[in-house]
Amino acid sequence: MFVGHYGPAFAAKIGKRPPSLGAAFLAVQAVDIGWAVLVMTGVEYGRIEPGFMRLSALRLDHMPWTHSLPAALIWSLAGMLVYRVFDPRGGWKAAALIGACVFSHWITDWLVHAPDLPLTFDGEKVGLGWWDSLPLGIGAEALVLFGGFAIYLGATKPLGAAGRIAPWALIALFVALYAYDKLGPKEAADTLKGAAPIALAAYLVIAALGFLLDRTRAPKSALQVGA
Ligand SMILES: [Zn+2]
C-alpha cells in the first residue's frame, strides 16, 4: 500500500492533544522508511517484475527486519517510546497513537501484498493479495485513506484560510501520486535498489507536508475547551 497508509495517520488526530501530523506521517511509513534504507544497503531485497500483480510490480523476496510481524511490533513499540521522549506534550495517549500508526502499516500491507510478510522473522509468509484485484486493491487504499481523512476533518478545525484549503490540496496530491504510481512511466527505476531512494524521498517530503499542514488546523476539542 502507498497513499492508503496515510489514512491511519489522519485518523490519529482525534482527542484533545493528538500527536503531530508530521510525526504520524513518519510513523505510518516508518517500516517502509527502514525498508528503503535496508534495500539500498542490500540487507533486504526483492525485484521489480512488471505484471507480478495487477497493481504492483514489487516482488519482495526478503524483508524480515521491517515487514515481519515481530519486526512490525518492535518498530511500533520503538515508535511509541521515541515519540514519548521527543514530544511529551500529548503524554502516553499520543505516543500510543503513534505506535498504532506504525503498526497500521503492517495491517494495511497485509491486505494488499502477495504473501511476502513473514509471521516470524524467518517463518511462513502472509498477505491477502488484494493488489491482484482492481476493485479490492484500489478500494482498500481509497477506503483507508478517505476514511482517515474524514475523521481528520471532523476532529480538527481550520485556523485560517490555509487550514481550509491545505487538507484538500494534500489529498489531491495523494490521488495524483497514486495515479502516477499506477499509470505513470516506469523507466524512473527498473531495480528495487534504484527505486528505494525515490520512495524514501517521497516519504520524507510527504512527512514535511504533514508538519506544515498541522500548523494550519487545531483539534476541535482543544479549541472548545479554550473558548
Ligand atoms: Zn510496507
Image (tube, helix red, strand yellow):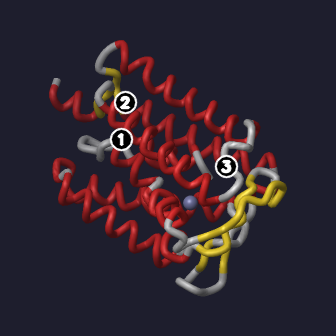
Q: Residue at the spot x=54%, y=65% of the render?
A: 39
Residue linked to disc 3: 189
Picture coordinates of residue 5 (x, y %)? 53, 50
- Mark in the foreground, 3 or 1: 3
Where ligand 1 lies, by image quadrant?
A: bottom right
Q: Is mark 3 on a helix, strand or loop?
A: loop
Q: How far apart are marks 3 and 1 (CA)?
A: 30 Å
Are the residues tagged 1 and 2 within 8 Å (C-beta)?
A: yes
- For residue 26, above or below residue 170: below
Picture coordinates of residue 10 (x, y %)? 44, 41
Q: Quadrant of the C terminus?
A: top left
Residue linked to disc 2: 213
Classify mark 3: residues with Cα within 10 Å, few (<14), some (14-19) or many (20+): some
Q: How far apart are marks 2 and 3 (CA)?
A: 30 Å
Q: Is residue 56 left or right of residue 195?
A: right
Residue linked to disc 1: 21
Q: Residue at the spot x=29%, y=34% of the render?
A: 219
